[in-house]
Amino acid sequence: MLLDQKRTRRLVQVVAILTSLAFAGVIFVVLGLVFFGGDASPEDQVLSDAKARVQAEPQSADAWEELASGYAGTGELPQAIIAARKAVQLAPRDYRRLQTLVSLQVRATDTDAAIATVQKFTADNPRNADAFLQLGQLAEDAGRTDLARLSYQAFLRLEPDDPSAVAVKQRLAQLTGS
């Protein structure tokens, strides 16, 4: 019995020492994070990673779009728009990249730039019905009825059987009547 008590006491001492060391290690990790960059927000980290990717892959539209997203996440809309514009330049037929750029321009309350961006895209990609639909919606929101009508007509000419065609026809009838 005496042997078991000694063994138990020694085991408790070893566990106490290991626990103290583990706690001290955690303290050093926490202090290291606080002093050496632990205050960086996730958005800042995303932006930092995106900048590194663009530097490593300057001709990658994905990298530039990631950078645009990183800037947007930190609220830096002018830089986000520049990066998104570069992504569109690198992949000029990719409608998804266009949507990223246009949404940033609209978020920055620059509807005229958004309309011009979509107009250029539709001129370069005249078979993209979704772009004409988006142009019609932007133009309508901006009060540019003639451009909205023309855009909706182009959409219907390209996609007469699209599920949203009925709503577009109704919208077109309302615009024509006004």
Image (cartoon, grey):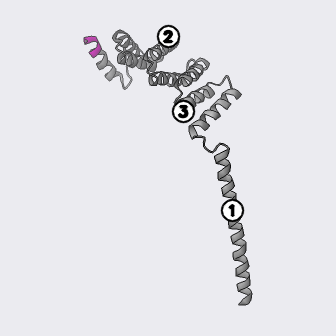
* Mark 3 surroundings: few (<14), some (14-19) or many (≥20) residues within 10 A: some
> Which contiguous range is marked in magenta?
173-177
Give me the disc on residue 74. Answer: 3
State whether residue 147 is above or below residue 26. Answer: above
Residue at (71, 67) in percent of width and height: 18
Mark 1 or 2, nearer chain start: 1
* Residue 44 placement (x, y as % from top left): 59, 36
Farthest residue, direction left: 177
Mark 3 or 1, nearer chain start: 1
What amino acid type is highlighted by mark number 3? Answer: Thr
Residue that badge 1 annotates: 22
* Mark 1 surroundings: few (<14), some (14-19) or many (≥20) residues within 10 A: few
Q: Nearer the viewer, residue 157 or 77?
A: 77
Give me the disc on residue 123. Answer: 2
- Left of 176 or right of it: where is 33? right
Residue at (49, 24) in percent of width and height: 104
What amino acid type is highlighted by mark number 1? Answer: Ala
| Whether label 3 touches label 1, CB < 8 Å | no
Q: Main secondary structure of the magenta part?
A: helix
